[in-house]
């Protein structure tokens, strides 16, 4: 019988665990096997939930960037710095495009079934 160290035992237990994400779109629990930890390290989650949580974090970051751009633009306008306002307008357009892409990616992930995909032969 192979010797199981505490770290090996913990790793084996994580591989067998189900995804700990709750409140799926169908108001149930995800039954997929957990393959990784969430970004905060608190949950064992499946690949789809890990991607969803990552995208939600990216959306929050882009939204924060847009808020800062708005604040900087107001300040630049008050100071008569139209050159800075134009630069910030370009940054705003890039951030809006990136945010739209993340929202689209998130929508796709959220529409996935969160069920294991069957392998085709």
Image (cartoon, rainbow, N blue to C red):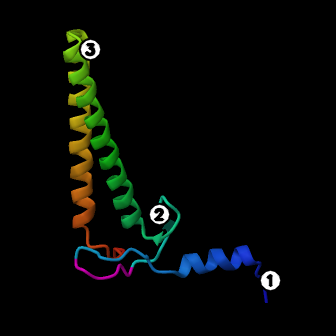
The 10 Å Cα crowd at callout 1, few under 14, some 14 to 19, many 20 or more, is: few
| Distance between mark 2 and mark 3 Cα atoms | 39 Å
Earlier sequence position, callout 1 versus callout 3: 1
Above-or-below relation of 31 to 46: below
| Residue drawn 26% across the image and 73% down it | 113
Most extreme residue toward the bottom is: 1
Mark 2–mark 3 CB contact (< 8 Å): no
Disc 1 designates what residue?
3
User: Where, by quadrant of the figure, is residue 25 drawn?
Assistant: bottom left
Question: Which of the pair 69/45 is nearer the observer?
Answer: 69
Earlier sequence position, callout 2 versus callout 3: 2
**Which is closer to the viewer, label 2 or label 3?**
3
Q: Is residue 64 magenta?
A: no
Disc 2 designates what residue?
38
Find numbered disc 2 in the image and state the secondary structure of the residue it sits on.
loop
Main SS, magenta region, reads: loop
Q: Which residues are magenta?
A: 26-31
| Residue drawn 30% across the image and 33% down it | 68
Question: Which of the pair 60/16 is nearer the observer?
Answer: 60
Find numbered disc 3 in the image and state the secondary structure of the residue it sits on.
helix
The 10 Å Cα crowd at callout 3, few under 14, some 14 to 19, many 20 or more, is: some
Q: Determine whether, in the image, residue 81 is placed left or right of residue 12.
A: left
| Residue drawn 25% across the image and 64% down it | 110
Q: Position of residue 52 (x, y in %)?
A: 34, 60
Q: Position of residue 39 (x, y in %)?
A: 48, 58
Disc 3 designates what residue?
84
Find numbered disc 1 in the image and state the secondary structure of the residue it sits on.
loop
Earlier sequence position, callout 2 versus callout 1: 1
């Amino acid at each position: 019988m192979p010797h199981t160290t505490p770290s090996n035992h913990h790793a084996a237990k994580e591989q067998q665990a189900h995804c700990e994400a709750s409140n799926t779109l169908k108001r149930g629990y995800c039954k997929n096997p957990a393959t990784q930890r969430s970004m905060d390290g608190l949950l064992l989650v499946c690949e789809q939930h890990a991607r969803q949580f990552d995208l939600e974090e990216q959306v929050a970051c882009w939204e924060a960037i847009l808020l800062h751009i708005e604040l900087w633009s107001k300040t630049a306008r008050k100071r008569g710095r139209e050159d800075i306002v134009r630069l910030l307008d370009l940054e705003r357009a890039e951030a809006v495009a990136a945010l739209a892409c993340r929202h689209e990616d998130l929508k796709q992930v959220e529409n996935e079934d969160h069920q294991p995909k069957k392998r085709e032969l």
